Image (tube, rainbow, N blue to C red):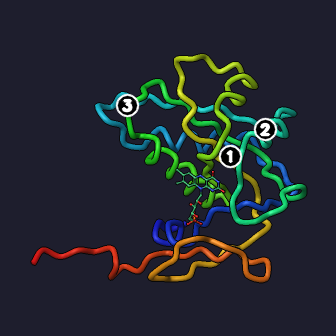
Amino acid sequence: MNLKKAIEKRRSIRLFRKKEVSEKILRHCIDQARYAPSANNKQPLEYLIVNNKKKDELFRCLTFGGEIDNKEGRPSAYIVVLDKNDKDIDVGLAVQNIVLTAFSQKLGSCILGAIDREKIRDLFNIPSNLKIKLVIALGYPAEKPVIEETEGPLEYKRKNGVLIVPKRKLKDIIRYEK
Ligand SMILES: Cc1cc2nc3c(=O)[nH]c(=O)nc-3n(C[C@H](O)[C@H](O)[C@H](O)COP(=O)(O)O)c2cc1C
C-alpha cells in the first residue's frame, strides 16, 4: 500500500467485526514499530499483546469515544505500549508505525489514552519500572468513518451512524513569517 493512501485513509476504528487477528499480523505490527526513530536510540518501548481471555477485562479499562455501544463489535486484540524511560517522546512515532502497518493489513485500530492504568498494571502484573503509555485496540473494521475538512469545532460525532471526523484545513495550520 502506498504511504500517502495509508496516511490519508487510516481512521480510528471503534467498531469491529467478529474475526480474530492472527498473532503473525500482531507481531508484524510490533516489528514495524522497531524501525521508528528513537531519541538517543534508547529504544525504550516494549509491547504486550492481549488476544486471550483477558480481553474483556482489558476492554473495561478503556474509554471509547464516538458514541458507540460496544457490546457487539469489540476489538479482537490489543497492544499495550510500555515505556522503560519516562522522559522520552518516542511513543507517538512507534504507535504511528503500528497503526499504519495495521491499516496496510486491512485492520482497523484505535489508539487509547483514556485508560485505567492502575487496573491494567494489576491485570497483567506489569512491573513498576514500565510506564503504561497507551493501548492500541485492533480488529477488522465494521465501520467507515468519514473526514470533514473544517475550521472548527473539532469534536467527532456520529450522523446517521457514520462517524464524522473533522480535520483542520491546510491553510489554517501553515504560518508564514511576515
Ligand atoms: C494519544 C492519543 C490518545 C487517544 N485516546 C483515545 C481514547 O482514549 N479513546 C478514543 O476513543 N480515541 C482516542 N484517540 C483517537 C482520537 O480520538 C482520534 O485519533 C481522533 O479523533 C482523529 O481521528 P482519526 O484517528 O480517525 O484521524 C486517541 C488518539 C491519540 C493520538
The kind of residue tagged 1 is Ile
Q: Does label 2 point to a residue whose CB lies under 8 Å from ligand 1?
A: no
Q: CA distance from mark 3 to mark 2?
A: 29 Å
Question: For the residue carrying disc 3, how many other residues have a C-alpha within 10 Å: few (<14), some (14-19), or many (20+)?
Answer: few
Q: Which residue is mark 3?
A: 87
Question: For the residue carrying disc 1, how many other residues have a C-alpha within 10 Å: few (<14), some (14-19), or many (20+)?
Answer: some
Q: Residue at x 37, y 31 (%)?
A: 87
Q: Which residue is mark 1?
A: 25
Q: CA distance from mark 1 to mark 3?
A: 30 Å
Left or right of 39 on screen, residue 156: right
Mark carried by residue 56: none
Q: Which residue is mark 2?
A: 51
The kind of residue tagged 2 is Asn
Q: Pointers 1 and 3 in contact (CB under 8 A)? A: no
Q: Nearer the viewer, residue 106 or 81?
A: 81
First of labels 3, 2 by sequence position: 2
The kind of residue tagged 3 is Lys
Question: For the residue carrying disc 2, how many other residues have a C-alpha within 10 Å: few (<14), some (14-19), or many (20+)?
Answer: some
| SS category of the residue bearing label 1 | helix
Q: Nearer the viewer, residue 104 or 137?
A: 137
| SS category of the residue bearing label 2 | loop
Image height check: is 78 above or below 166?
A: above
Q: Count the marks.
A: 3
Left or right of 15 on screen, residue 147: left
Nearer the observer: mark 1 or 2; the answer is: 2
Image height check: is 126 above or below 159?
A: above
